[in-house]
Image (cartoon, helix red, strand yellow):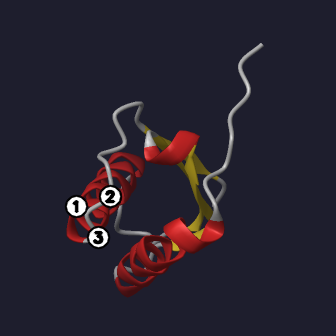
């Protein structure tokens, strides 16, 4: 069994807040966004999206936003990926 540890909120908060703001500006509502395994992976749950965005476009937007903001904040690239769940 693999245990996934969450990174301390203090390290993840600025980049997480920027990810949430950027996605919100595009009309993508996120119910949770967490940095996992010391930044090697992210988990994002999308709770709503504009009707004109396909599921694929939302996934690409989330992926690109996480990559861009981790780079801007000097955090490691999520080499294990970004888990994206669409609830809405």
Q: Assign the C terminus to one quadrant of the image.
A: bottom right
Mark 1 → mark 3, Cα distance in angstroms:
5 Å
Residue occupying the point 61% across, 54% down: 7
Residue pointed to by mark 3: 73
Numbered label attached to residue 71: 1
Mark 3 → mark 2, Cα distance in angstroms:
6 Å
- 15 relative position to 13: left or right: left
Q: Assign the N terminus to one quadrant of the image.
A: top right
Numbered label attached to residue 75: 2
Q: Is residue 5 visible?
A: yes
Residue occupying the point 68% across, 41% down: 5
Q: Quadrant of residue 64?
A: bottom left
Q: Do the CB atoms of the residues marked 3 and 2 lie less than 8 Å apart?
A: yes
Q: Position of residue 26 (x, y in %)?
A: 34, 79
Q: Do the CB atoms of the residues marked 2 and 1 lie less than 8 Å apart?
A: yes
- 81 relative position to 73: left or right: right
**Residue 6 to residue 70: above or below:** above
**Residue 60 to residue 31: above or below:** above
> Would you call the spot at circle 3 few (<14 residues within 10 Å), some (14-19), or many (20 or more)?
few
Return the residue nearer the eye: 14 or 22: 14
Q: Position of residue 84 (x, y in %)?
A: 52, 46
């Amino acid at each position: 069994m693999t245990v996934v540890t969450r990174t301390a909120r203090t390290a993840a908060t600025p980049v997480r807040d920027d990810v949430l703001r950027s996605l919100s500006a595009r009309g993508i509502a996120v119910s949770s966004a967490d940095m996992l395994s010391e930044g090697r992976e992210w988990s994002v749950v999308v709770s709503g999206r504009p009707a004109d965005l396909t599921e694929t476009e939302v996934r690409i937007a989330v992926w690109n936003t996480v990559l861009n903001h981790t780079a801007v904040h000097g955090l490691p690239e999520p080499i294990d990926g970004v888990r994206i769940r669409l609830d809405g």
